[in-house]
Amino acid sequence: MRTPAPRLRVPAPPYLLHVHPAAVIVATPAKLNLYLEILGKRPDGYHQLETLMVAIDLYDTLECTLRTDGQIVLECDHPALPRDAANLAVQAALRLREWAGRPELGATLRLHKRIPLQAGLGGGSSDAAAALVALQQLWKLALTRHELLAMAASVGSDVPFFLSAAAAWCTGRGEVVEAEWMGDVLHAVVVCPPRGLSTAEVYRQVRVPAAPRNGTAARAALQAGDAAALAQSGFNRLQEAAFLLDPRLETLCRRLAARAPWGAMLSGSGSALFALCPSRDHARTLAAAIRTPTDEPAPRVFVVRSVPSDGLVLI
Ligand code: C5P
């Protein structure tokens, strides 16, 4: 008989690493969508969805320091990242300052990027959540939880998740977050092809199903800590659209699935693919098998686990 799963509820990200009156540093994770179904298209152009998300131990770090010149400046080690209001972290900072009605507030945001861009891993949304938490501390602003979540949702559909839970069932356009229990830590291999995908473009291609699926089995598997059942009930409605936009992604997914114990799928709107594994050792072996030096340019391969309840491990 299976022993009852422990009920893990991991503290919500982002994680404060350092708090000082003049500087706040936070670590903020990536996410995987274990299940994603589209229920319909909304009058505002967004899609009504149901998704099961977990935070994984692949982190960006954001250091915010005070400026006295009223400027909001983003510094980042990734050359392709926009530094202006097109960046969600900058957008979050601008909205927070506007809410405060204090145009003199300034900050330098130093972003150390590890989460790949345009991967469906939520990196931009996670950075925005990090900026909200860090700057709220640094600028000594007292938003209510409700105000903070509303501001997060106005920046992007996934941002509230990164302020709310390490595992959650998300509905609406993704911004309505219900924290989820996890029965066990999940292990996975994440494969990021060199070419990313635009979220808006993938949604434009998606076919709204006449009879949407039901995510109950996936939720139950996560709660039970049954990774095999979770992989079996895993689904992503955006996958077909992403494969249409980039057929090489389908080939890569097949290659990963052929070597993985329980198959592979797309995360969010892609282009990252992932395979759940029974253990970290399995994940390491699979990662080594999928890293072939002949791929040019090579996809990036990460061995990850769901955000651990026993503290941070920065990779
Ligand atoms: O909310 P966010 O800015 O992250 O969404 C990016 C784009 O993805 C939107 O402009 C929209 O085209 C698409 N999207 C959607 N339905 C959702 C979430 C995103 O159509 N639920």
Image (spheres, rainbow, N blue to C red):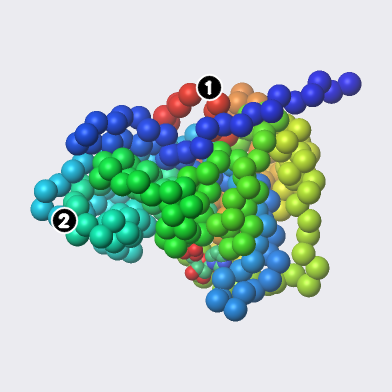
The quarter of the picture where residue 65 lies is top left
Q: Position of residue 28 (x, y in %)?
A: 42, 40
Callout 2: SS = loop
Type of amino acid at the residue the image marks with label 1: Asp
Would you say the beta carbon of the disc 2 residue lies within 8 angstroms of ligand 1? no
User: Which residue does the numbered mark 1 point to in the structure image?
Assistant: 310
Q: Residue lying farthest right?
A: 1
Label placed on residue 282: none
Tell me residue 69's x, y (percent): 10, 53
Which of 122/164 is in front?
Answer: 164
Identify the residue position indicated by label 2 in the image: 104
Local secondary structure at mark 1 = loop
Residue displayed at 67% across by 34% down: 182
Residue 87 relative to residue 312: left or right? left
Residue at mark 2 to residue at mark 1: CA–CA distance: 39 Å
- Image height of 303 relative to 142, above or below: above
76 relative to 207 in the view: left or right: left
The answer to whether one can see residue 78 in this image is yes
- The residue under the point 65% across, 40% down is 180
Residue pictured at 35% horizontal, 46% vertical: 142
The x and y percentages for residue 165 are 55, 41
Of labels 2 and 1, earlier in sequence is 2
Check the image and report above or below for 245 versus 44.
above
Q: Amino acid at mark 2?
A: Glu
Label 2 Cα neighbours within 10 Å, binned few <14 / some 14-19 / many ≥20 = few
Residue visible at 55% across and 76% down? Answer: 44
State if disc 1 and disc 2 touch (CB < 8 Å). Answer: no
